[in-house]
Amino acid sequence: MRQLINFKLRITFSVLAIVLLATQNAFAQFDVEKWSLADEPLLGFVAIPTGSFPMGSNPLIDPMAFENERWSQSRRQGIVDVPLFYISRYETTVAQFREFANATQRNVSASSLEGEANYPVTNVTWTDAVAYARWLDQQLRMASDLPSQLRRFLDEGGRVTLASEAEWEKAAKGEEGRIYPWGNQADKSKANYSSDGVVPVGSFDCPDCSFGLADMSGNVWEWTRSPYQEYPFDETNDRDDLASDALWVMRGGSYSDEANNIRASVRGAADPGARRPFIGFRVVITKQ
Amino acid sequence: MQSATKKRDFKSRSTKVRETSSVNENMPVIAGKHLLKIPSLFTLALFLLSFTSRVQSNDVLIYSFWASCLALLAWQGWLLKHCATQKTEKSFIVALKPQHYIQAMVHLSVYIYWGMNWQPVQDHAVLLIAQIMFAYSFDILLSWTRRESYQLGFGPFPIIFSTNLFLWFMDDWFYLQFIMVAIGFLGKEFVRWNRDGRFVHIFNPSAFTLGLFSLVLITTNTTDLTWGPQIASTLSLAPNMYTYLFLGGLVVMYFFSITLVAASAAMVMFALSALYFSIAGVPYFLDSDVPIAVFLGLHLLVTDPSTSPRTPTGRLVFGILYGIGVFVLYTVLDMLGSPTFYDKLLCVPLLNLSVQWIDRMVAPLRNNALLENWGLGVTPSKKANLVHMSIWIGFFIVISLLGKTDSRHVGDSLPFWAQACEEGRANACERLILLESTYCNDNSGWACNAIGAEYFYGNNVPQDTERALAYFSRACDLRFQAACLNFLDPSQISLANPRAFDFRLLLREAGQNLLGMPEDQLYQRACEHGWEFACDKSVSI
C-alpha cells in the first residue's frame, strides 16, 4: 500500500515538474523595449560557428529522403562550408512582426497580425519576411545598446536577412548531420508536428536540439533566401535562371506535416506571394 | 381609363408649352386623371429591378435603387396632391422623333457589339435599363411639375445611352449615376436660351452632365469611383471597332445631316496627329491616331442636331473646334496629371455654348457662291450632305488603308517607347513610365520590375530607393524572379525578359484578352511589337 502511495506521489510530482518545465519553456521571454526580440544577451541570436556539414540526405541513413534532397547524380550528400553566422533561436513572432508592420505601415495581411504575441507569425509572404529582416537590420544598426558581439558582426559586413538553405540546414541538423534537430528518430515531445495548429514559439523543451534552437522542425515552415533550384547547392548561381516563375525554398515543415516532412533536409518551396497559415520565418545575421 | 386622344390645340395652350421645343400640331395628345400614375409604373419597374441578382449583389446598389424609388415616389405624391388641390390634369404628347430612336438604335448597336467583347458591359445591362426607368419617371415628373404636358417618346434613351457610353460609376458609388442622370435632365429643363425665336435647351443633356461630373471628378481626384478609364480603353476590344463606329455614324449622318460636324472633327484630329508624329517622331495619343472613345464621341456625343449649329458652315467650324479642343485638352489634362480620357467630354458643353456665336460668325458667308456650291454655305441641303458623306467615306477608307484606324498602332509597342525614350524624343520617357506603371497595375511582374529599376537608378524618374523596393516587392509577389532577387539584394539589379504571362498583358493593345492565346502566337505577336528575343522564341516553339 505504502509503495503504491509512493508511486502515485512520484507520478504526481513528475507530472507537476513536467508541467512547470513546459510552462517555463512555453513562455520564452521577449523584450518589448527591443522590438519584442528574445530577452537574452544576444537578443535571441545564436552563433553558428564556421564549419562544414553534410548537406542533403543519405537514403541509406534516412529512408524517408526525397529525391530532391540528393546532392547530385553521383553523390548523395555534399559537404558545404558555412562561415560564422547568427540565427534567431525562435521563429519570428506575431509581436515582432506587429512592431515592424506598425513602424513601416507595410500593407501586410490582417491575419498575420491577429495571433497571440508569442506565436509564430504566419500568413506572411516571402517579401513580407524579407522586408521584416531589412527593417530589423536598420533597427539594430541604429540601436545604441546593441550587444557588442552583434555590433561587431554587423559592422564587419553582416546583415539581417533570411537564412540560405545551407545556413538553415546546418543550424537544424548540426555539423554531424542529424535527421532531426535532436537526433535521428522522430519524437513528438520535441516538436509541434502532426497536430491541429501552431503553438507559441519555444514551447517544446529540446536541450538536445542542435545549437539550442527551437522549432527548427515543425510548428511553421520557414522561408529562406534561396530560390528553389536543383542541388548541388550553390548560392552564387541564384541569378542564373531569371526566366522561370519565382519559387522560394522553405524549410522545417509545419504543425500539419507528418514526421517525414519535418526532417532537417526536407526542401519545400512556395510562390513568394503565398500567404498560408503554416508558413512563417526566422531571421539570421550573415555576411554571405 | 378616362384618357382620350385628340389633336393638340396649339392656341389653347399657354406659351409655356411652346417653350418645350419642337412640338407640332400633328402629335397626338393623351390626357386623363389616371395618367398621373404612369411615372409610378416606371418607379415600380425600377423597384422590381432592384431584386435582380445583379443589383442584389451589392448593398450600396440596392440602397441606391431604393433611395431613388423613394425620392421619385415622394415627388409623385406631392404632384398628385398638387393636381388634386389645383384641379389640373396632366397629359402626354406622343412625340416619336427619329433623332431619338435612330440615335438610340445606333447607341444600342454599339453596346451590343462592345458587350460581346467586354463582359462588364453585359453586367451593366440591368443598370442601364434601370437608368432608363429612372429617367422616364424623373423626366415626366419634372415636365409635369413645370407644365401640363410631357412629350412621350424615346427621348430618355439616347441621353442614358450616350451618358453611359462614356462614364458610369462603380457599384459602391452608383447613387451618383442616378444623380448624374437627374442633372442631365435638369440641365435640359432649366438651362435654356432663346435660339431663332424658340426657347430651347443649350446643352446636349448627356454632354452637359458628363462635362459637369468630369470637372468634379478631376478636381476631387476621384476618377477611380468610375469605370471611365476602362470604358475609354476597352471599346477597341471589339475587333474593327473604328469601322463599326464609322458605319453606325453613317446612319446618323444620313438622317440628321451632321456629317460636317463628325467628319471635320475626325479629319482635323487625324491631321493634327499626323503633323505631330512627323515633327516629334512619336504618336500624340498614346495608342492610336484618334482614340477610339474620341472617335465614338465625335459620332454620337457631339452630333446632337439640336445643340449644334444650324448652318453647314457653322457645323464645319463646330467640328473643327471639337477636334482642336480634344487635341489641346489631352495635353492640358496630361500636364495637370489628370486622366486624359476626359478630353472628349469637357469641350462639348463649351462648344454648345458657342453655337449661336458660330452661326452668327458664318452668316456673312451667306452669299458666297463657291461655298454654297460645296454645300458649305448657310443653307442646309440633303444633297450636299450626301456629297459630304461620300468625301468622309473616301477619307476613312484612305486612312484605314494607311493603318490609322483598326490596325496595330506603333504606340502599342513598349520597345518603341523604350527606343524613343533612349533617343530623347518628346514625352517618350514619360509615356514609357506611364505604360510600365499601367502594366504593373495590371499585374505584370516584368513591368513592376522594370519601373522599380527606373526608380532605383533614377532613370527617367527621380531616384527613390524605397519606391523601387516597393515595386520589386510587388513584382516578386507576382512571381517575377529577377524582382525577388532585386528585392532581396538591391546591390545588384537584374532585369529579365517578360514571361509569357507578362506578354499576355503587355501585348493587349488597349485591352484584348490574350489569356488563352497559344504561346507560339503570343511570341509571334511579341516579335511584331519589337521584342527581339521573342522572334527566336516563336520560331523555336
Image: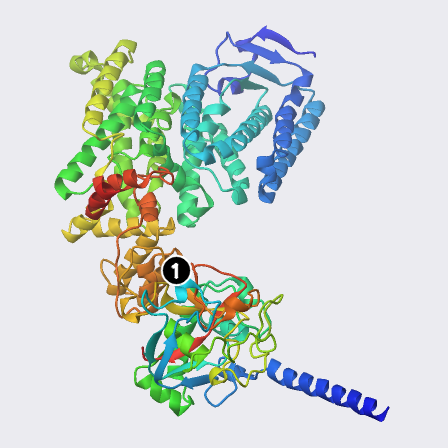
Indicate left or right for A250 with B285 as reference.
Answer: right
Q: Label 1 sits on what residue type? A: Leu
**Residue under circle 1?**
A247
Q: Is residue B186 visible?
A: no
**In the rendered image of this protein, does residue A184 appear above or below residue B481?**
below
Q: Residue at x 55, y 74 (%)?
A: A186
Residue drawn 79% across the image and 87% down it: A8
Image quadrant assignment for residue B114? top left
Q: Secondary structure at mark 1?
A: loop
Taking the image as shown, residue A253 lies to the left or right of residue A160, namely right
Packing grade of label 1 (10 A; few <14, some 14-19, many >=20) is many
- In terms of depth relative to the viewer, which is nearer, A65 or A84? A65
In this rendering, position of residue B425 left or right of residue A179: left
Count all numbered tags in the image, as a single digit.
1
- Tell me if residue B510 comes above or below residue A223 in the rendering: above
The structure residue drawn at horizontal position 33% and vertical position 21%, both measured from the top left corner, is B249
Q: Quadrant of residue B261?
A: top left
Residue B463 at x, y percent in the picture: 26, 65
- Residue A271: image x %, image y %? 42, 58
Give coordinates of residue B118: x percent, y percent.
Answer: 42, 34
Percent of width and height locating residue B19: 48, 20
Height in image: B538 above or below A25? above
- The answer to whether any part of residue A112 appears in the image is yes
